[in-house]
Amino acid sequence: MALYIVPDKCIKCGACWAECPVNAVHENHVFYIDSEKCIDCGACDFICPINAVFYDIEAALKCLQEEAGEAKLSMEEAEIKAKEAEDKAKETNTEEDKEAVQAATDAATAAKSAFEAAEASLAKVQAEYEAS
Ligand code: SF4
Ligand code: SF4
């Protein structure tokens, strides 16, 4: 089985394409590895600046599942903090606490977006895995 590039992680820098000794990395909107040509040398994995290359699709799936799980926890924590800030601001009614509510709400919104992005990346790779 050839190494695997996670499409949503890849920043399309082309380093893996330039490094591959057998021209097994191709680009068609996303970079991908041709399993027929790949000799599993690992050079693309080594050169990738943001760890978008995995030993195989199952390893990529495991990583994305972990990331989605972590993103979910972060989102839940941020939602709890936003609720706490809201409750405090209701009690004190100070400008400072109202600003804290806004900051906590923004953080919760960002955490939710990150979770949704992680879920979407996972779903794409899961679908590819199931189709393979
Ligand atoms: S593992 Fe080696 S041969 Fe396979 S795509 Fe990466 S650089 Fe090319
Ligand atoms: S080296 Fe990594 S980030 Fe750059 S194109 Fe290849 S997979 Fe994508």
Image (spheres, rainbow, N blue to C red):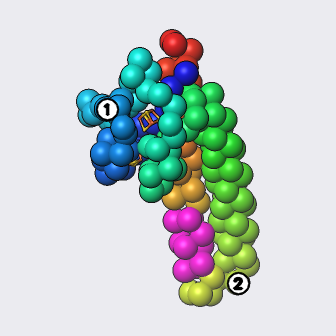
On whether ligand 1 comes within 8 Å of the CB at mark 1, the answer is yes
Q: Residues within 10 Å of mark 1 (few under 14, many from 20)?
A: some
Check the picture and name the quadrant holding the N terminus.
top right
Q: Which residue is drawn at 63% across and 82% down?
A: 97
Q: Residue 58: where, in percent of width, then height?
A: 62, 28
Seen in the picture, residue 37 relative to 109 is either above or below; the reply is above
Q: How far apart are marks 1 and 2 (CA)?
A: 64 Å
What residue is pinned by disc 2?
Answer: 92
Residue 52 makes an appearance in the image: no
Seen in the picture, residue 35 relative to 73 is either above or below; the reply is above
| Secondary structure beneath label 2 | helix
Tell me the number on the disc at residue 119: none
Please count the marks in the image.
2
* Ligand 1 shown in quarter: top left
Q: Which residue is drawn at 51% across and 58% down?
A: 110
Q: Residue 24: where, in percent of width, then height?
A: 36, 29
Q: Residue 23: where, in percent of width, then height?
A: 31, 32
| Secondary structure beneath label 1 | loop
Q: Which residue is drawn at 28% across and 33% down?
A: 27
Query: Which secondary structure type mostly characterizes the magenta part of the structure?
Result: helix
Q: Are marks 1 and 2 in contact (CB under 8 Å)?
A: no
Seen in the picture, residue 4 relative to 34 is either above or below; the reply is below
Any magenta on residue 28?
A: no
Q: How crowded is mark 2: few (under 14 residues within 10 Å), some or many (20 or more)?
A: few
What residue is pinned by disc 1?
Answer: 23
The disc labelled 1 sits on which kind of residue? Asn
**Magenta-drawn segment:** 98-107
Horizontal relation, residue 52 to residue 97: left or right? left
Q: Residue 94: where, in percent of width, then height?
A: 62, 87
Q: Which residue is drawn at 47% across and 28% down?
A: 39
Residue in front for this viewpoint, 14 or 20:
20
Horizontal relation, residue 116 to residue 34: left or right? right
